[in-house]
Amino acid sequence: MTLTLRNIAKTYPGGTRALLPTDLDIAEGEIVSLLGPSGCGKTTLLRIIAGLETADAGAEIRFKDDDMTHQPVERRKVGMVFQSYALFPNMSVRGNIGYGLKMQGLPRAQIDARVDEVIALCRLEPYAGRAIGALSGGQRQRVALARAFAPRPRLLLLDEPLSALDAALRGQLRDELAALLRQFGITAIFVTHDQDEAMAIADRVAVMSQGRVAQIGTPEALYRAPQNAFVARFVGNSMPLGGRIEGDQLHLPGGTLALAAPSDGMAAFVRAEDVRLAQDGPLTARVTAVTFLGTHYRIALSGATDQTLFCLHQGQSAPKPGETVRLAIAPQSILTLTPEKAAA
Amino acid sequence: MGKALQLAVTLLAAAFLLVPTIQSVLAGVTVNYFQGISSGLTLDWIGVVWELYASSIFLSLGIALACLCVTLVIGVPAAYALARNPGRLSRAVEEFISLPLAIPGLALALALLQLYGSYKGFRMSWTFILVGHVLYTLPFMVRSVQSVLAAIDLKTLEEGAATLGAGPARRFFDVVVPNALPGILAGALTVVTLSIGEFNLTWMLHTPFLKTLPVGLADSYASMRLEIASAYTLIFFVMIVPLLLAMQWASARAQQITK
Ligand SMILES: Nc1ncnc2c1ncn2[C@@H]1O[C@H](COP(=O)(O)OP(=O)(O)O)[C@@H](O)[C@H]1O
Ligand SMILES: [Mg+2]
């Protein structure tokens, strides 16, 4: 199902502008992630789509050709996985998964068949008869997913479904969840503040910052061609090169770098893998720490810019802390972007 | 030494409470109290009580059940509304319905008499006593249910049900009520126990044709021979003690949830 959002904004009663007017289009079967730091409005946007929150006047929400803007939540046929899962403690695993089907008024036999099918799909067979209190966090997460998916919703909405789990489990369940969502073949929106999760699960990622979508695109596009400073730092792990830009020259405390094009008024960024140790490089820096990471060294450098700069170095040996080294950064690997204040 | 003293004090206190009770109970099954146990044991007095006061006992049971129904129908939705809308207004409403707890039963009864005393049909009906009991027991039901509801994330649970297609009524009966059950049970037992045992307010509201169990008890103390009054006390204990125990058990269980 395609989802069309137009002019979605939200001002909470207290006056918090949680969401600035936002447009978003999601294609049939697409999995889109809303990625951004805590408080940027992800949950608000998700809840507006579900119908759990009303948007400010002027909004438009369409599920394929149906105008859903004023439909109550129980008529939207969305499956939602809550951050806290919100499983019904008074029902068993089966009872939870079958609840949405029961609400559709299906005959008992049909409900049972569908519940069995979803239980098998989510590999929940051993736990089907259990009480919710007798499940681990990972099992609860899967029951919540199965419950949301069982009634064949038009759209699946997931609000940080992995954030309640401990770190060790999260990585494993992330890949499982990604595989399951693909298997479901359903249009889905997945909220997270973790960029690895977003990248692993989504076809497209909408990066959010302070109530607006800063950029939306495939993980590769966001990584390689961020359109603003926020996306560069949040998704690309880019480090700011804090200095003065004059035409195509970037003046830094440790030397002057050449830029690919004149970039006055912009902010410059670079990724650790694009910083090279080079005997004839234009930047001077002092090594403050060296970490051996198997395939490469991670070298922390001071003095080149106004903050610590990192360099991923793939040689057989690395300089020692305290040594002075020279660095080079190719002009085309320096990202010049609109500064963050203007972007946000 | 300290332990022994503690034990002695405890036993003494228990004896202080128990001895009159046992004595009274024994009096109810003794042929002649003034001659003592040696006169023999009998169930005759209980039979007499039953003949004289069965209607009081049934009236009390009837009022307690009716009171339970009314407090359930009003109290559970009220507790739900308070739990869903926490705020200053809710707190004010809560204080307001708890007011009868702070007012002596006599004053409450007087207010009811002043307000409705002139409606003869109502004044003479058992529903008049029922209104007094409802006013007195409702806060217990509301508080009991509310404390359980406050301990669960009701809003999110209901939102979960809503996304699965449940309208407001389904959400209330499928999610709210089952999860509030321990609080409802504790509240229900409290309401029934209080209603059956209530004397102050009921004594003011009763008519010669409508005596509840405790009012009948007072009547028997004043006008019957000691053995009959004691037998009546025995019947009252047999009814109220299991209820008290069940109430304590249910309240403890409900409190575990709130933790
Ligand atoms: N019910 C609410 N009332 C008032 N402010 C809210 C409410 N819910 C969220 N907010 C505010 O709106 C902003 C966005 O919140 P949210 O959408 O939950 O962000 P995220 O999910 O990205 O962490 C935050 O500043 C938050 O404090
Ligand atoms: Mg959130």
Image (cartoon, rainbow, N blue to C red):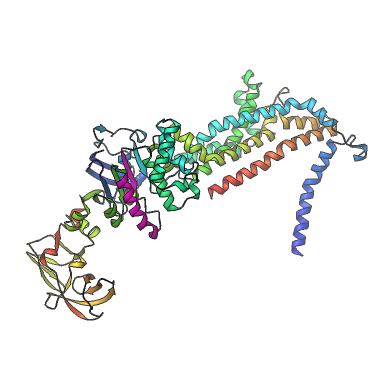
Q: Quadrant of residue B157?
A: top left
Q: Nearer the viewer, residue A207 or B219?
A: A207
Question: Residue at the spot x=56%, y=33% of the render?
Answer: B72
Name the quadrant of the N terminus of chain B: bottom right
Q: Nearer the viewer, residue B151 or A272?
A: A272
Question: Residue at the spot x=66%, y=41% of the render?
Answer: B246
Q: Is residue A36 visible?
A: no
Q: Is residue B206 left or right of residue A111?
A: right
Q: Is residue B103 left or right of residue A184?
A: right
Q: Is residue A258 above or below residue A343?
A: below
Q: Is residue A69 left or right of residue B43?
A: left
Residue A279 among magenta residues? no
Q: Is residue A221 above or below residue B200?
A: below
Q: Give how far across and how far down residue B239 sits, in percent.
A: 72, 35
Q: Quadrant of residue A119?
A: top left
Q: Give how far across and how far down residue A326 sits, in percent.
A: 16, 77
Give the magenta range. Answer: A154-183
Q: Give how far across and how far down residue A101 sits, in percent.
A: 41, 35
Label total for image: 0
Q: Is residue A290 above or below residue A175?
A: below
Q: Give how far across and how far down residue B183 sits, in percent.
A: 56, 41
Q: Is residue B138 visible?
A: yes
Residue A168 among magenta residues? yes
Q: Is residue A331 left or right of residue B113?
A: left
Q: Is residue A198 above or below residue B158?
A: below
Q: Nearer the viewer, residue A323 or B200?
A: A323
